[in-house]
Amino acid sequence: MARPILSRIAPMLVAAGLALPASAALDIGDPVPKFTANAALAGKTFRYSLADALAKGPVVLYFFPAADSSDCSIEAHAFAEAIDQFAALGATVIGVSADDIDTLAKFSVKSCQSRFPVASDESKAVINGFDALMQTRPDFANRLSYVISPDGKVAYYYQNLNPDKHVERMLNAVRALPKAAASR
């Protein structure tokens, strides 16, 4: 019988200098809700499917409060700059916010530099499914990032309103995935 993913990767995450987060509705090893959503990449809209993305490898799913805000633009730019590193590890990146798709189409060009898609979740169904709703401002998603292994389970998560460490922590978590999971 296979051991849970946490028991296999927790030592690698700690060795990589990553602390395991204290709590989240979706904990390490939990299955994630599969979703489809309207998304934008390079200003063009399409239908994004998490299941389809996971069939290709691990997914970094990050939630952000609002397109074009200073910190969200900084974070999107940092993910865009690191997208080749994620791709080299077999991972894809998707950002999600409660912004409308027209706003995100512009944001996908300006801040995401046409390097990765961003999805609109105006109903907040995905945001709520991943417990990413900002409690103090419920019209917005919290800044919460997940690494999802190809088997559809949480491999790592990080929550902090400061955008500075999300990309670094997600890269380290993807690097710590077992090779079979990362190269699927």
Image: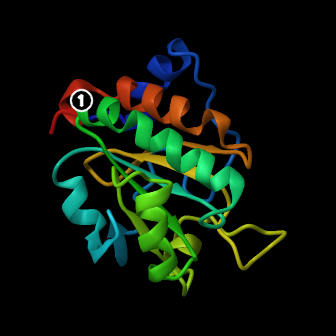
How far across and how far down the image is residue 80, in percent? 42, 43
Residue 97: percent from the left, percent from the top? 55, 69
**Residue at (36% x, 73% y) in the render:** 39
Viewer-nearest residue: 72 or 4 = 72
- For this orientation, the residue located farthest to the bottom is 123
SS under mark 1? helix
Q: Nearer the viewer, residue 111 or 91?
A: 111
Q: Position of residue 74 (x, y in %)?
A: 61, 46
Residue 101 visible from this viewpoint: yes
Residue located 42% across and 26% down the image: 9
* 11 relative position to 71: left or right: left
Asked whether residue 35 is in view, the answer is no
State the residue lying farthest toward the right. Answer: 136
Q: How many marks?
A: 1
Name, please, the residue furthest toward the top. Answer: 15
Report the quarter where the N terminus lies.
Answer: top left
User: Is 168 rendered above or below residue 52?
Assistant: above
Q: Residue at x 24, y 29 (%)?
A: 88
Q: Amino acid at mark 1?
A: Ala
- Residue 170, placed above or below residue 49: above
**Crowding near pointer 1: few (<14 within 10 Å), some, many (20+)?**
few
Tell me: residue 121, above or below residue 151. below
Where, quadrant-wise, is the C terminus in this rendering?
Answer: top left
Give the residue at x 67% y 69%.
Answer: 133
- Mark 1, residue position: 88
Q: Nearer the viewer, residue 127 or 140?
A: 140
Q: Quadrant of residue 127?
A: bottom right
- Left or right of 22: which side holds 158? left
Colour scheme of the picture:
rainbow
* Residue 110 at x, y percent in the picture: 47, 58
Q: Is residue 88 above or below residue 121?
A: above
Q: Is residue 32 left or right of residue 99?
A: left
